[in-house]
Image: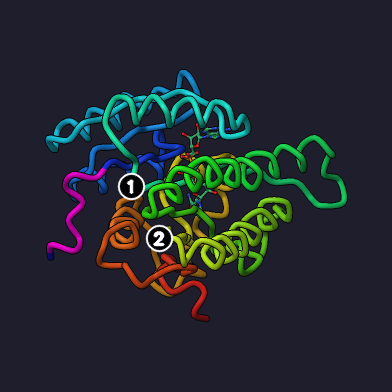
Amino acid sequence: MKRFDLSGKLAFVTGAGSGLGQAIAIALAEAGADVACFDLAGVLGQAETSAAIVAVGRKALVLDGDVTEPASIEAAFDRAERGAGEIDIAVNSAGIANVSPAEAMPRSQFLRMMDINLNGLFWSCQVEGRRMLARGRGSILNMASICGSTAVPGLEQAHYDATKAAVIRLTKSLAAEWSGRGVRVNCLSPGFMTTPMNCRPEVAENVRKFVDMTPMKRMGQPHEVGWPAVFLSSDAASYCTGVDLNIDGGFLSI
Ligand SMILES: NC(=O)c1ccc[n+]([C@@H]2O[C@H](COP(=O)([O-])OP(=O)(O)OC[C@H]3O[C@@H](n4cnc5c(N)ncnc54)[C@H](O)[C@@H]3O)[C@@H](O)[C@H]2O)c1
């Protein structure tokens, strides 16, 4: 079990103030890591995340920034490393979701989705990768989605799906590019999870349908993404890179 132990490691998690990013930050701490929690300024959930990390005896740093601003990611990364040592693990969970029929989607809505879910994730990987490559070690874990591999009937979110398909491809390409230099890059593809993202009014009606469509006949709990994240971030996954791990109650198996 020593290979799963993250004691002595420092993790950097984007979107740590809510939902899956929060659950992952806490799971990494439970596995022994100190965690730098990055999210937009003023996100109230950041206090909850850091309290949970401290409660399991690990160090938490709360860092404000915006993934669409590479300079703010860089500044947060610097602050974390000044405060707690070198970052070994990065998890990029910051993201948004919304819906609109494709034929009516305003340009601004499409571009914002790209800017946060795809461009922002790339800037995060770039900042994280530069540091890790220089040291010849590190693990980056990106948040994709089952929606990167399939369209869910009734959800009009072509722009969201496109970003998640791109995250899966980006992850595999970065894995290939950096694999000989000590940095592993993997992604997670959750199905329908009980996070604030799935409490949006436009999704609420669909939740029963999602449960019906999922072979396990239930939504996933955020902590059920946390432990797979621990595995892929740990030395137990030392030969895993370019993996897209489905955490979906069997959704993509049908
Ligand atoms: N909830 C699900 O069912 C589900 C399923 C598959 C994939 N995902 C993905 O998981 C990730 C997290 O989703 P969630 O359900 O936890 O959502 P959430 O809304 O609960 O949390 C997202 C977090 O990202 C932060 N964020 C948004 N824009 C940001 C920006 N520009 N810079 C920094 N932080 C920003 C938010 O403040 C928030 O704290 C997303 O990438 C989402 O697409 C979620």
Q: Residue furthest right?
A: 103
Q: Residue at x 33, y 25 (%)?
A: 82
Name the residue tied to disc 2.
182
- CA–CA distance in space, label 2 to label 1: 11 Å
- Name the amino acid type tagged 1: Asp
Give the number of the mark in front: 2 or 1: 2
Give the camera-side residue of 113 and 208: 113
User: Dots 2 and 1: beta carbons under 8 Å?
Assistant: no
Residue 78 horizontal/vertical position (percent): 42, 28
Q: Main secondary structure of the magenta part?
A: loop
Residue 80 horizontal/vertical position (percent): 35, 29
Above or below for 141 versus 86:
below
Residue 213 horizontal/vertical position (percent): 52, 70
Secondary element at tag 1: strand
Name the residue tied to disc 1.
88
Q: Quadrant of residue 62?
A: top left
